[in-house]
Amino acid sequence: MPLKNLIRDVRVSLSHRRTKRRAYRQLSAELAAFHTPAERAELDLILGRHDENETAEIRAILNRQDYERQRARMTVGGYRA
């Protein structure tokens, strides 16, 4: 493969990765707005209507956000703040 083509392929690959990361961050920010139990229940109902493969990324983001919220409530000694 000529060097020129290799450089082009790397640039295209990096561009796609940046686009995917930007979309992931935007989706994470939008999902973070669903933080009350009622909002999360509604979102879970909506996600339940779709195939597991279609919602895997969203569920992973929600699980990560839930974990981070629970972790933020805990102190070093294991007691809730």
Image: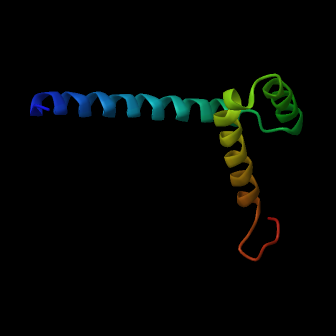
Q: Is residue 51 above or below residue 40?
A: above
User: Toward the viewer: 53 or 20?
Assistant: 53
Taking the image as shown, residue 33 lies to the left or right of residue 20, namely right
Q: Which of 43 and 10 is in front in this view?
A: 10
Q: Where is residue 65 in the image (x, y as percent from the top left)?
A: 69, 46
How many tags in the picture? 0
Residue drawn at x 72%, y 53% is 67
Q: Is residue 69 above or below residue 40?
A: below
Quarter of the view holding residue 14: top left
Q: Residue at x 77, y 23 (%)?
A: 50
- Residue in the foreground of this view, choosing between 29 and 41: 41
Residue in the picture at 42% in, 28% down? 19
Q: Where is residue 35 in the image (x, y as percent from the top left)?
A: 78, 38
Is 11 on the left or on the right of 74, as rendered? left
Q: Nearer the viewer, residue 2 or 22?
A: 2
| Quadrant in which the N terminus appears | top left
Estimate the x, y position of residue 75 in percent, counting from the top left: 74, 69
- To which quarter of the image does residue 52 belong? top right
- Quarter occupied by the C terminus: bottom right
As drawn, is 5 to the left or to the right of 76?
A: left
Q: How is the protein colored in the picture?
A: rainbow
| Image position, residue 5 (x, y; %) | 16, 27
Identify the residue at image location x=89%, y=33%: 38
